[in-house]
Each structure stands twice: as C-alpha cells, then as structure tokens.
Amino acid sequence: MRISLQGVKADGMPDGVHKHAITYQPVNPHIDDNENRTIIPFDTVAPAGPLCIVWDNIHADPTNNWESINCLYHPSDTQPGTDAVALERANFTGGNWRQVGNNTPTFVVQFADHPNEGQGYSQIVAYTNLDGTGQYSGFAMSGTRKVRQRFTISGPLSVKAVWLRAKRLSGTGDLIATLNGVTAIASVSNIPQTTKTNLNGSEWVRVPLVVSLPAGEHKAEFSTTAELDIMPIRRDGWEGNGWEIPYTVGRSEKSFNGGSSWADLYNHATDLQWYLEPVEPPPPTGGFPPETTLTYITHPNQTLPPLRVPVATSLGTKLTRITDNGVRHAYSRIQPWNIDGSLLLMAYGAQILDGNTYAPIKQLGTLPGYAQWSVTDPNVLYGTWDSETKLFALNVQTGAISTAKDFGRRVSLGKGEGAISDTGRIALQTLDAPWLVYVWDTKTGQFSSFPVPINSDNVTMSHDGNHVVVFYDPTGAGTGKGIWAYNADGSNGRQLSEIARHGDPAIDQSGRQVWVQCSPSAFMVDIITGAKTDLLGTSAFVNGHVSGRGRTGWAYFSDYDGTGTAPGTDQVVAVKLDGSQKVQVFAFANRKASGYESQPQATVSRDGKRVLFASDYGTNGYYAFVAEA
C-alpha cells in the first residue's frame, strides 16, 4: 500500500502529485476489533496549503492482493453535524463506483510537534444514511444560538482573520465572530445555499479580525443572523472506541440562549473546523550584497569584533562574531544550520547555538564524526566513527544516540566532506578494501552499494539525491582519477574533472545539478552531461574552498591564503552560476595565521543570506563569524 500526500485541485480532488509518499506493508491481515490499530510514521511535512491523504494499492496484481482500510463505524453510530464523504470502490461487474456498505474508514493523524492537537477522522457522518435520508441532528446557528471554541495558546499570537467552515441553510445575514473581546463581521451571502441533506463540501468563511492574543485560554465565538450549520470535527474519541487521545488544548461549545449556558457540543470533546490566520512575520531585513565583478579590494587590518554584536563593514554588510575562541563550524561542504534554521552546529567545540541569535543552547557530550543534520528532523544529526560499522543518529535535545544503519563494514560519512542530499540520501564509503560506496535513504531506509576502483578521498551526494560524486586523489584521465559522478546505483560513471580540487555539488541558475570547483580555475560541470562552464578568470580561489549548501544558482567561495593581490584575495563571496562572472562580496576573512582551524572554509545558510566562516582575525586563536547584507 502506498500512502501519499497530494495537493488539491479546484474540484477538491487530489492533483496526483506525490509531495510525500511512503510504502507500507499491512501487518494485520484482518482486524475485527476496534482496539486494533497500526501506527504508520510519516515524513515531516512543510506547510503547503490543503492536502489530501491518498491510499493506493500499488501491487502488480491488486485483484489477488487486495487491501482495505477498515470501516469501524456504521453511519448511525457516528457523531452528527460533521462533514461526510463516502468510501467507494469500483463495481467489479460494471466498473462503476459505489459506496462500500454505507460505512466509512477511520484514521487518526497524530502530529509530531503537537501530539494532542492533531486528531481527526476521515469520515464522520451527519446522517443515518450516506444518501442524505434519515435523521439529521446538526446544530444550526441563528439569532441567540451560538457556538464557540475554547482554546489555549502557549505564547503571544497576532491574528488578522478567523476562518470557519460552514454552509448556509437559509437567510442572507452575516457571520459574526468575536475573539478576545474584538468583534468582526463577514458576509456569507455569497456562500451557496444548501439543504440539511446535502452538507458535504461545506465552505470556508473568512472573517477579517485583527487582534493580539496573549498566552493563555481564549474563546472564539461565532453567531449569525442567517441560519448556518457549523461542521465540528471530533477531536477526542467516542467512549470505548480504542482511539481516545487526550484533548487538552480546548473544545467547542454550544448555547441556546445567548451564551448564558454553554455546554460541550454533542456532549463530547470536539473541535470546530476553524483556524486562526496569523499576521505574517515581517520579511527578513537581510538580503544580498550587490552583484559586481571580482576584483582585488584593499582593506585595513581589523580588530576582533565583540561577541554577538553586529558591526558594519566597509563592504556595506554586517559581520557578527558568534563564538568564543576554539569554537567553529565543520567545513565548507557541510550545512551547519538544521533543516528549519533554528539550530546551528559548531563541530569544533561540539556546541549547538541558536540559529538566529547565536546564543549557546547546548554543549554536546558526544558528537559523532562528520555530523550532518537530518533533512526531516530538526533535532537529529547523522554521523560515523571510523572505528565503527554503523551510521549513528544523535538527538541533540535528549543526547540519545541510536543506530540508524549497520553496514557491517567500517564506513565514513564522506570523510568529513560529504553532504546529505536535499531528498535525504547519504553517501558513505568503506574504510577497508574492497572499496565500496553505500547510498542510504534516511526517509525510506532503502540502500544500495557499488564498487569503486580505489580508495576514494571523499564522497558526497548531488542535491537531488540521484548522483554520487567521488573524489579520487590521482590526476589525469581515466578510471580512479580526478572527480567522477555515478548514478545513485553506481551506473553510468563519468569523469567531471581530471584534477581533484576543492569543490561542492550545487544547482546552477538553470536548475541543473552541477559540480563547482575553484582550482586550478573556477568552473562548474553539469553532472549529467559533463558540459563545462568557466565561472571566474584569474582569482585567489586557487587556494580556496567552495560551498553549494545555499540558494539555487549560487556557490560560495572563500580564500584561505589571504595574501597577494589576486582578485578575491581574503574575500568571502557568492559566485553566480551562469558564467556571467558576477559575484556578491559578503566579507573579508581577515585571516593572518596559518593553522588549519583558522581557514575560513565558508559555508552558508540554506536561504543563502548568511555566510558562516572561521578566522583567527589577527589573533592566536580561531572564531566563527556570520556575514550578511
């Protein structure tokens, strides 16, 4: 069975595009007791508008390998007043769709971040029969009859509108919403009128209402002079159904006499189909430096900035020292910010900083080698130890370390220069002969392996997860020399560069998967076609590093020599990946010492607006800095 999230078309049907999908083998061939249920973990889902949950039987012979979603309730036993959609199946004789025994399947969605707030049932029916005949027991609002939602928030919230799902039965009046003492009105006359036997597909009504809510309990009250039917979705379980999960955030209530006697709606802990539309946060003040041509820029020696105090630079950018001496990021090719940008890893010093304020959050007791952030869980780092055969997962909040995958061979996560793909795939290399590359999918758990001719210096993934880039130390044309790319299964090996120098996979301005290299000259190579594009002329980045960890269309270069007068000397820049030789200059590294730890090895935030680099800054130590426009 495949379970996927798909977008919603204008007609309300799934759009067929799998935003997230997993395959699942049911473990219970038959369930006839409503205490049985199966928990199916799913990927983290970013906000993307309305979504459909779609079940598919993807077996090659679905007729003889059928699967079903259990129908736990007959409509007469379900809670009234809720939106109804029938489960249907194809008629084996005529090919037409029909209802399955007038029953509907039940499921619970449990969110990872708020496990007590995400309960919902696929179909909770409003009538005795799904064709609309029989008893109707919805709660119609009119005049003094109101509904309200009690809810609790943990922190302040700025609201600009309230949304309620409803459908008009009669009248042309307005919907009145009151939130924290503020009242607003929205006309519902444009909502299609319906009957009590045709409530499916109820409409969303937006009530503009600007109010600031402090932390604590609040009440959103809805009333109307027109007659509306409110569609509450049950959030807690029906007694004894085996699906109860405590609902502690709030509940909906009804009143028949103007609010003097409120009671639980249907005598159960329920939740209206409603939500608050928050005020959008202001756009980030940071942007990008202007595009220019790479040149040599003179600049005076600079003193060490104070800790976590932004200072203006002669380039028009801001520079912030974010660490004390001896604490810095790992490397240019490793993304230091977690997937949602809330945390920042300082591998040297094993510290976790706040991803925005840079204040220290946690000192890690143990940090796996070559640690990389998960692309699905903001609290998980993956890493390896050279003495181990396993890929480990570290939860930075709890400190718990678990085995993500045991390969049975000593492996390394790219020897400190590999990166997880945007799709969650990791490339690992064996540390003993025979030399192999493993590709493991952190989302599905699937993995493959393929042999390589010699011990490689490092391996990494392309951003789309479809290609492995392997770095061989010997130079020249031929197998086992320079930079090679392979399909994720090891097929279609092709040489990208005869000379292996610092570089990183990136995505160019045209959306192509490319390998970007800074030495002996700056260029990029299409990973699929091998087409080469020069990026810069003579530059100081012959002694440099590359990061492709940021925005599409750009790679970030830094110079670790810091001397001479070549264009780009001591600069940290973004290079436009289109051959135009345009750059954006973020900072001077101001590196004066010769130690490895003081090399800038610049990397970048996921949106490309903040560049992180290291430097001694004219001292005997080394620190981490962030530069932004």
Image: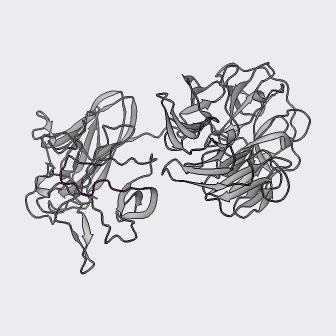
Residue 25 placement (x, y as % from top left):
36, 56
- Up the image or down, 451 lies above or below 153; here it is below
- Furthest-right residue in view? 564
Whether residue 353 sits left or right of residue 507 in the image: it is left
In this rendering, the count of numbered labels is 0
Identity of the residue drawn at 65% across and 51% down: 437
Residue 313 placement (x, y as % from top left):
75, 29
Q: Tell me which corner region of the image, top left, top right, bottom left or bottom right, holds residue 12.
A: bottom left
**Residue 589 visible in image:** yes
Q: What stretch is highlighted in magenta?
A: 25-33
Work out whether residue 440 or residue 252 is closer to the camera in this orientation and state it: 440
Q: Which color scheme is applied?
A: one colour
Quarter of the image with the N terminus is bottom left
- Furthest-bottom residue in view? 94
Q: Is residue 27 magenta?
A: yes
Whether residue 199 sits left or right of residue 216 in the image: it is left
Quarter of the image with the C terminus is top right
Whether residue 393 sits left or right of residue 458 in the image: it is left
Residue 120 placement (x, y as % from top left):
27, 47
- Up the image or down, 609 lies above or below 449; here it is above
**Residue 508 visible in image:** no
Q: Tell me which corner region of the image, top left, top right, bottom left or bottom right, holds residue 197.
A: bottom left
Work out whether residue 437 or residue 559 is closer to the camera in this orientation and state it: 437
Work out whether residue 61 or residue 398 is closer to the camera in this orientation and state it: 61
Residue 201 placement (x, y as % from top left):
26, 60
Whether residue 311 sits left or right of residue 439 in the image: it is right
Q: Is residue 445 magenta?
A: no
The overriding secondary structure of the stretch rendered in magenta is loop
Identity of the residue drawn at 70% across and 21% down: 326
